[in-house]
Image (cartoon, helix red, strand yellow):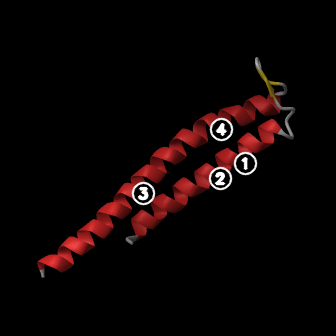
C-alpha cells in the first residue's frame, strides 16, 4: 500500500468518525430530532456537521478503496509480467 493510499483511507475514516459522533450527539445530548428538525441550536450545528462530513467521508473512502484496489491489481500485473 502506498503512503498516499493510506492517507486517503485514514482521512476518510476520521471524517466518517467525526460525522457519526456529531450524529450521535445530535440525537442524544443536543435534544434529539423531531419532524421539523433538531430542537436546539447545538442540534442544528451538529446536523450541519453531519451533512458535511458523511458525504465527504464516503467519497474519500471510495477513492481510497479504488486506489487500494488499483495498487493491488497493479502489483499483481507487474509481478506476472516479469
> Do residues under tags 2 and 4 come within 8 Å of each other at their CB atoms?
no
Q: Residues within 10 Å of mark 3 (few under 14, many from 20)?
A: many
Residue 42: x and y in percent read 81, 33
Image point 84% across, 40% down: which residue?
A: 28
* N-term mark: 2 or 4: 2
Give the quadrant of residue 64: bottom left
Identify the residue at the far top of this view.
Answer: 36
> Do residues under tags 3 and 2 come within 8 Å of each other at their CB atoms?
no
Q: Residues within 10 Å of mark 4 (few under 14, many from 20)?
A: many
Image point 32% across, 69% down: which residue?
A: 72
Residue 1: x and y in percent read 39, 72
Q: Residues within 10 Å of mark 1 (few under 14, many from 20)?
A: some
Q: Is residue 75 above or below residue 61?
A: below
Residue for badge 3 = 64
Q: Which mark is residue 50?
A: 4
- Under circle 2, the secondary element is helix
Residue for badge 1 = 21
Report, in whole angstroms, how far the alpha carbon at label 3 lies from the one at label 2: 16 Å
Image point 72% across, 40% down: which residue?
A: 23
Residue for badge 2 = 17
Image quadrant holding the C terminus, namely bottom left
> Do residues under tags 2 and 1 come within 8 Å of each other at their CB atoms?
yes
Image point 19% across, 75% down: which residue?
A: 78
Q: How many marks?
A: 4
Amino acid at each position: 500500500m502506498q503512503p498516499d493510499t493510506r492517507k486517503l483511507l485514514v482521512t476518510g475514516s476520521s471524517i466518517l468518525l467525526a460525522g457519526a459522533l456529531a450524529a450521535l450527539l445530535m440525537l442524544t445530548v443536543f435534544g434529539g430530532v423531531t419532524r421539523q428538525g433538531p430542537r436546539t441550536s447545538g442540534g442544528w450545528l451538529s446536523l450541519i456537521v453531519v451533512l458535511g462530513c458523511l458525504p465527504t467521508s464516503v467519497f474519500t473512502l471510495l477513492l481510497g478503496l479504488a486506489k487500494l484496489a488499483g495498487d493491488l491489481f497493479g502489483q499483481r500485473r507487474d509481478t506476472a509480467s516479469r
